[in-house]
Amino acid sequence: MNIITTHIAVDIGTNSGTIVAGTADETIHTEEVHRFDTKRIQQGNHIVWDVDHLVRETTIGLIRAEAE
């Protein structure tokens, strides 16, 4: 019996984030399921990532990966 599992990768970079789903049997298969821009906001004298936006977009990607 060959059980195929799916693994999810979350890559958050400087300008964008990506959610990728991958499976492995005889070969490795990957599929980009969601891509989004990383937003920055001003906090005092600093420019920082909008963490609420990152969490929202990551959650959307995980939901899409589960649906596929």
Image (cartoon, rainbow, N blue to C red):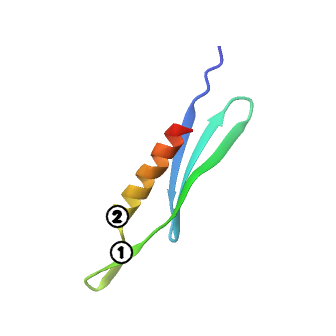
For label 1, the residue is: 48
Residue at the top extreme? 1
Quadrant showing the C terminus: top right
Residue 9, horizontal then vertical, whole percent: 53, 47
Tally of numbered discs:
2
> What is the crowding at mark 1: few (fewer than 14 residues within 10 Å), some, or many (at least 20)?
few
Q: Is residue 52 above or below residue 3?
A: below
Asked whether 47 or 64 is in front, the reply is 64
Tell me if 23 is positioned left or right of 45 in this view. Answer: right
Element on which disc 1 rests: strand
Q: CA distance from mark 1 to mark 2?
A: 8 Å
Q: Measuring 61% from the left and 26% from the top, which residue is drawn there?
A: 4
For label 2, the residue is: 51
The reply to whether callout 1 and callout 2 are in contact (CB within 8 Å) is: yes
Residue at the bottom extreme? 45
Residue 57, horizontal then vertical, whole percent: 43, 57
Q: Is residue 63 above or below residue 18?
A: above
> What is the crowding at mark 2: few (fewer than 14 residues within 10 Å), some, or many (at least 20)?
few
Quadrant showing the N terminus: top right
Q: Measuring 74% from the left and 29% from the top, which residue is drawn there?
A: 26
Q: Which amino acid, by three-letter code, is at mark 2?
A: Val
